[in-house]
Amino acid sequence: MKISKEDLIRINGGFGGSLRSDSSIEFALQQQKNRKLGPYRKLAYLWRAILVNRPFSDGNKRTAVFLAFAFTDEYNKKIDRDLIVHHALSIAKKNITNIRQIEWRLKNAIK
C-alpha cells in the first residue's frame, strides 16, 4: 500500500484521535518498502502497529479497519465487513503480535 505517516495521522484524526507514539508506525511503514513482502504481509505490519501498539489516543481499531477498506480498493478485492471488524477487535483484545496470524486473518476476510 502506498501510505505515509501523514496519511495515517490524517485518517486517524478523522476518528478523533491524535498521535501519541510513532515508533511502531515508522517500523510498519519501513516494511512497506520491502519488495520481498506481499501486500497482505505489509498490511499485517500496519495492523499490528495500530491495533497492538495503539499509537493513537483514540480510533486505533477504526483506523485499522479503514486501512483494510483502502487495501481492498487498491487491490480490487472483496471484503467481509463483519469478519474484518471481528478480526480487528480480536487482534486488539488479545494483543496478537504474530504477523503470520494477522496476515492469515486479513486473507480470511479479504479475497
Image: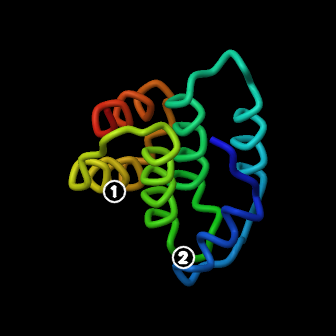
Residue 18 coordinates in the image, percent (x, y):
67, 77
Amino acid type of disc 2? Asp
Label 1 Cα neighbours within 10 Å, binned few <14 / some 14-19 / many ≥20: some
Query: Which residue is at a point 78% across and 52% down the rendered structure image?
Result: 23
In the rendered picture of this protein, how many numbered marks are placed on residues?
Answer: 2
Image quadrant containing the N terminus: top right
Query: Which residue is at a point 61% across and 49% down the rendered structure image?
Result: 49
In the picture provided, is 74 more to the left or to the right than 91? Answer: right
Label 2 Cα neighbours within 10 Å, binned few <14 / some 14-19 / many ≥20: some
| Cα separation between marks 2 and 1 | 14 Å
The outermost residue toward the top is: 36
Helix or strand or loop: what does disc 1 sit on?
Answer: helix
In the picture provided, is 65 more to the left or to the right than 18? Answer: left
Mark toward the start of the polypeptide (2 vs 1): 2
Query: Which residue is at a point 46% across and 48% down the rendered structure image?
Result: 73
Residue 35 coordinates in the image, percent (x, y):
72, 20
Amino acid type of disc 1? Leu
Q: Nearer the viewer, residue 98 or 80?
A: 80
Helix or strand or loop: what does disc 2 sit on?
Answer: loop
Q: Is residue 67 above or below residue 97?
A: below
Query: Which residue is at a point 55% across and 30% down the rendered structure image?
Result: 39
From the image, tell me which residue sits under label 2: 58
Q: Nearer the viewer, residue 17 or 91?
A: 17
